[in-house]
Amino acid sequence: MAGCRGSLCCCCRWCCCCGERETRTPEELTILGETQEEEDEILPRKDYESLDYDRCINDPYLEVLETMDNKKGRRYEAVKWMMVFAIGVCTGLVGLFVDFFVHLFSQLKFGVVQTSVEECSQKGCLALSLLELLGFNLTFVFLASLLVLIEPVAAGSGIPEIKCYLNGVKVPGIVRLRTLLCKVFGVLFSVAGGLFVGKEGPMIHSGAVVGAGLPQFQSISLRKIQFNFPYFRSDRDKRDFVSAGAAAGVAAAFGAPIGGTLFSLEEGSSFWNQGLTWKVLFCSMSATFTLNFFRSGIQFGSWGSFQLPGLLNFGEFKCSDSDKKCHLWTAMDLGFFVVMGVIGGLLGATFNCLNKRLAKYRMRNVHPKPKLVRVLESLLVSLVTTVVVFMASMVLGECRQMSSSSQIGNDSFQLQVTSEDVNSSIKTFFCPNETYNDMATLFFNPQESAILQLFHQDGTFSPVTLALFFALYFLLACWTYGTSVPSGLFVPSLLCGAAFGRLVANVLKSYIGLGHIYSGTFALIGAAAFLGGVVRMTISLTVILIESTNEITYGLPIMITLMVAKWTGDFFNKGIYDIHVGLRGVPLLEWETEVEMDKLRASDIMEPNLTYVYPHTRIQSLVSILRTTVHHAFPVVTENRGNEKEFMKGNQLISNNIKFKKSSIVTRAGEQRRRSQSMKSYPSSELRNVCDEHVPEEPAEKEDLLQQMLERSPRAKTGPWRSASAL
């Protein structure tokens, strides 16, 4: 027997049959990552619903308003402020938990492997050291991948999904307690496993989940957690708390409460009001100082000193007292910063383009296969990353002379980073005394330590080392982002850009002879340029970097660099988060419309063949409509179409009307009682007519409830919009 795939005719041994080519639905195209043309965007998926952020002015809402007075209003506002404070504290504690165990596991791993390398460098058993490093990394990454299998939404940074949620698109499972647990423990293992990912991006997702769940005092994942707390049940209130939680995550990650507030405003929510601004800032401050209090007490033993404001600290940029010609930056340097912004935008656009192609490849060839394939892909990435890091540290590094400040202490670290931390992060693999291995110092350290080395290390890094480090890190970070592990992109982008900036500073110093250049400033500008070219953020990222450096004089060069990087990158493609929003098929509206859209009229985009329902519609018809359409909301119209005022009665989410569970068969009378109870909170004469009919009880039969409903074919009553919580 001969077969055909994708053709119009199929032939067997006896006959040939011809027919139309089988077409896939938009949902199948999205899941498989396929489009009709390679250049087309992925179509929206069907499992996304809109969130009702607008107040529904109906009779129940008016009844609630009548019972409200000034005393109840003040109590409601006080409870909201207490919830905002609790969200900030809990988000700070989540960041403390992640940071503590990442530091513990990383210190254990690097301590064991470094001791083995020092012993085996003389005995010739470096392969054993590589196996030890592989054992640590593969174990941690395997655990992170397993957690993502439990909750697939926990993969990635979570910022695209939270952005969609704040803009009115409900992503299934994005703010569940199970998602938070898998995210926190998963990012802990993925960072400790040596992958080129950061923990700062997932902190934003974690804060958003805390903001969504804490004011509810109940959990869908753990149904036993349920308290009688009557406040904040609407999507509108939940959105405000999610905005505060996302801002608290940024504040805890970078020690930047103002930057977190601006991040939630710029990149997150499209629904904003004046009262929300102050609450979000208060929540960000609470998260920052909670994390600062506990981290300073644990690390320095001085409780209440507030020396470590965030998970990522850039240290204090300061010229040496002995160098009178040194300046952090001058007006002449602005020209170099603009050029670096252009290059950073080009590099960011290249990064996004490569990552988009990798994501589409995963959607076509990895995701449709068994889930074990995703775990194997993560382990493959970990294996390649570990081997590259080990071999580059042992073979490609150069021995560079240590600066005097590195030996006796570096004043530029002062409170944030002590001189012992700087010296401990310098690696001397295969190098004689008074020298260090520059490649091992960058690769064989936690990413935060490598960033501090590029920002503040007075010792020189070889241009060849910086170029190789940038190329390897760029490719591996691009490959890693999108695998089935919780992963952030802020720290890898900062480290990659810092290496690029330090390379520019070395070239200007060594080959052009500009001796006044401060290498740390160029490393910071390079980090901002590359990160801006990848994520395309401007206002919030500028403030975040200024708060992280604690140096207001960097405001102008950082802002100029980010603007140039964004303009350059936008000429080629979108930011990385917007790209992944599109790849997930989320119907998210852009901030600005294209020029061609301004020329369109309503008739150009409206559907001529409208699918609608009547106030009295059979269940069989509703099921048929749901199975033959790709949306869930339909207009309810009256049979008398001559009356235009009653033509459009409203939208009814039909899928909520025919919810059923195969596991628990309920009687028809029980279904009617449940339906009538849910309708009491939404008084309507049309809805109450359904409950007036007396239906005798019938014994439950062990068959599909949907089949029972189709056989009886009762007439379903539809009405104005109802939320899922009412059903």
Image (cartoon, rainbow, N blue to C red):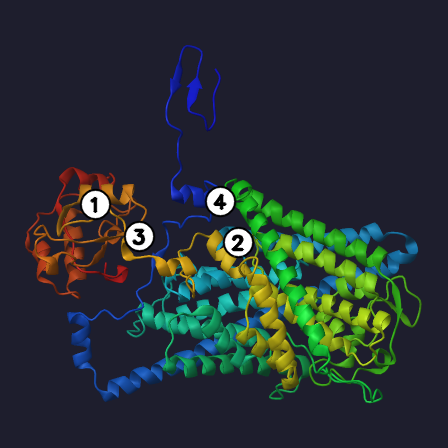
Q: How many marks?
A: 4
Q: Which residue bears the numbered disc 1?
A: 622
Q: Which residue bears the numbered disc 4?
A: 33
Type of the residue with mark 1: Leu
Decide which of tag 2 and tag 1 comes sooner along the chain. 2
Q: Position of residue 343 (x, y in %)?
A: 67, 64
Q: Position of residue 80 (x, y in %)?
A: 36, 80
Q: Nearer the viewer, mark 4 or mark 1?
A: 4
* Callout 4 touching callout 2 (CB < 8 Å): no
Q: Nearer the viewer, residue 22 or 430?
A: 22
* Callout 3 touching callout 4 (CB < 8 Å): no
Q: Is disc 4 surrounded by few (<14), some (14 to 19) or many (20+) residues within 10 Å?
A: many
Q: Position of residue 341 (x, y in %)?
A: 65, 69
Q: Is disc 3 surrounded by few (<14), some (14 to 19) or many (20+) residues within 10 Å?
A: few
Task: Measure the C-alpha gap from mark 3 to mark 1.
Answer: 28 Å
Please identify the residue farthest to the front as the structure is shown.
Answer: 599
479 relative to 327 in the view: left or right: left
Q: Which mark is residue 604?
A: 3
Task: Measure the C-alpha gap from mark 2 to mark 1.
Answer: 36 Å
Q: Nearer the viewer, mark 3 or mark 4?
A: 3
